[in-house]
Amino acid sequence: MTDLNNAKQSLTTYSVKELNESIGLLLSRGFAPNFILKATVSKSQIKKGHLWLTLTDGKASIDGVAWSSTRKSLKFIPKQDDGVVIFGKLNFWESQARVSVQVFDIRPSISTVLKKFEIVKSKLYKEGLIDDSLRKKLPKYPHSIGILTSVPSSALADMLRTSKERWPLTKLQIIPIPVQGNNETELKSILSKLKINKLKLEAVIIARGGGSREDLMLFDSEIIAREIATFPIPVITGIGHEDDLTVSDLVSDHRSATPTAAIVDLLPSREIEKNKFLQNKKILKDYLKLFFQNTKKSLIIKKSFFQSYSPRLLIKNKRTKINYMYGILNALSPEKLLKRGFALITDESGNSIYSVQNVKEKDKLIVQFCDGKITAEVDSLNYDKI
């Protein structure tokens, strides 16, 4: 009993407040001021503007809080069962001897991002909103396009430089948008207004530069994906890096690897188009040259044809032919024969006598010479022996 009393006298005596203060001092000295915590949210609620969380790894749990001033700047508000990565510090309430994690920043874990991606993708697939047949054709030479991205940003600077190099004729309408964080409502409102298309855009590009896959979670939003899927003009997405794939990419009309690639995919290259133009110009020139050569040959052939059938030539040919026939007839005319010493014998009626058998004695005959006629009477008939 004496030993027990002596032991009690050697122990430090605390009040509850003093004990809690000592625990707090011990924690502040022996624990890192700031740390990163990987956990799953088993409970999430907002009270009086503060975000209260229950965090677990399946074996243990701890409370967490993001004060209202911090919560307003958070880009991600977790829900139950979301995996998170928290940057924070340890809070110890001395009055209750209660430990919690004060949250400075909170990000979704990659498992949460991929889980949300798969859930939304599966839902939209079943509804038929992710379908290659729904993709609208990109305009070949757009006069005006909209670029939806953060302003200012290196991605926008690269896009503006590339568009000026490729096709400066296209008018660019820059529409600032949030590109990460819990901004579904703001981005949906912008897309809804653009659907009216008062700017007369022919296509829009939704772009965001590189970052972690967790930073792209806004573009896995079902709300945003539905707006893109029902957009009246073609939508091109250039979000993150080449290996990043979001739900917005799946419902867009064309997915580009990067923001700069989106400009390259949408706008024609003036160098390529110039070379095409020069090539087409040469083809047209060669075609016209050949066309006129063939037309000239055809006209020459037609001219020759019409000349051969011209009335003047036909008359000339007919005249030549007539003159030829006239020459023949003239050479065989009775007058020519009479001049050569022949005579034409006819009866009194003017009928030609070709044979002795056509006359009889006492018939009157008329003998025509080249210079006149005589009348004769048949005295006798003498027949040649055959």
Image: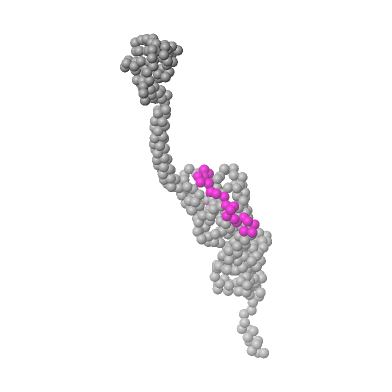
Q: Is residue 148 visible?
A: no
Q: Looking at the picture, does residue 139 appear above or below residue 40?
A: above
Residue that appears at 35% across and 13% down: 369
Q: Is residue 16 left or right of residue 162?
A: right
Q: Is residue 139 left or right of residue 304?
A: right
Residue that appears at 51% across and 46% down: 140
Residue 179 pos. (x, y %): 56, 55
The magenta stretch spans residue 139:
yes
Q: Looking at the picture, does residue 126 appear above or below residue 59?
A: above
Residue 87 pos. (x, y %): 56, 65
The magenta stretch spans residue 363:
no
Q: Specify start and end residues of the magenta stretch as a single range.
A: 125-150
Q: Looking at the picture, does residue 200 appear above or below residue 130?
A: above
Residue that appears at 41% across and 42% down: 283
Residue 13 pos. (x, y %): 64, 79
Name of the residue lying farthest toward the left:
340
Q: How many marks?
A: 0
Frontmost residue, 183 versus 72: 183
Which quarter of the image is occupied by the N terminus? bottom right
Q: Quadrant of residue 340?
A: top left
Residue 242 pos. (x, y %): 50, 59
